Image: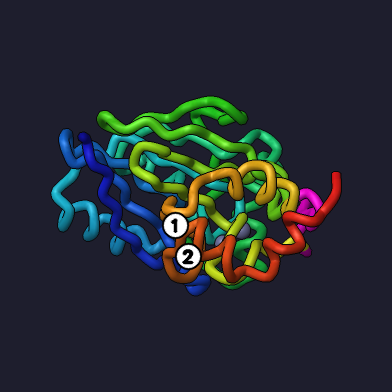
Amino acid sequence: MTKAKALIIPVTPFQQNCTLLWCEATKRAVVIDPGGDLPDIERAIAQANVVVDKIWLTHGHIDHVGGAADLRAKLKVPIEGPHRSDLFLLENVVESAKMFGLRGASNVTPDRWLEEGQQVEVGELTFDVLHCPGHSPGSVAYINSAQRLAIVGDVLFAGSVGRTDLPGGDQRQLLKSIRDKLLPLQDDVTVISGHGPITTIGQERATNSFLQQATTASG
Ligand SMILES: [Zn+2]
Ligand SMILES: [Zn+2]
């Protein structure tokens, strides 16, 4: 079976997990959430010896998208995701860069907005798109059931969940997204989050205290 491989490149002062993900059979790759530090990302691409076909975004926060427009211009590949509800964030990247004192971040318009139930492809790998609002209104997760792999952005972390105090955040909605979209995945699914270590659905189901709230939350 075609295998997925991933290399995590922490970028920006927020140590965001930019992920270089590729199809082992074809060596075609996607860069997920190029928040900044493009030289580090380009080095990883060269090291993995893969050809990048696409950029995927999980949501519109600066640490995830700050370098996306520049990387698109360099690699001449389309940007897919997130959900259209994060448009207001993607139009505000330069402003937030000023606020955080970051350099070189650009506003970005994706080539393709994503919605619940759509699929995205890289090489021979296909990922299902889940719309998981709450951390931001347009957050999406990318799921490959065959590879037991979920890329979830800032929706779910090892031992924690995404913050909901930023514009458009909604804690009730976040817990509902986790309960309805992520918890139905099987325990052996590996989770790559936007920050911090890799985990699994089983590990989080068993130990993440926020998920107890998620399973009991109503509505
Ligand atoms: Zn975020
Ligand atoms: Zn983040």
> Where is residue 177 shown, x and y percent of the image?
69, 46
> Where is residue 180 shown, x and y percent of the image?
68, 43
Marks 1 and 2 sit apart, C-alpha to C-alpha, by 11 Å
Q: Residue furthest right?
A: 219
Could you say which quadrant of the image residue 95 lies in?
bottom right
Residue to which mark 1 is pinned: 192
Could you say which quadrant of the image residue 124 lies in?
top left
Is the distance from the Cβ of mark 1 to the nearest ligand 2 atom less than 8 Å? no
Residue 140 is one of the magenta-drawn residues: no
Is the distance from the Cβ of mark 2 to the nearest ligand 2 atom less than 8 Å? yes
Residue 34 visible from this viewpoint:
no
Q: Residue at x 58, y 61 (%)?
A: 205
Secondary structure of the residue carrying numbered label 2: strand
Span of residues in magenta: 165-173
Quadrant into which the N terminus falls: top left
Q: Give the amino acid at mark 1.
A: Ile
Quadrant into which the C terminus falls: top right
Residue to which mark 2 is pinned: 16
Could you say which quadrant of the image residue 43 lies in?
bottom left
Q: Residue at x 73, y 52 (%)?
A: 174
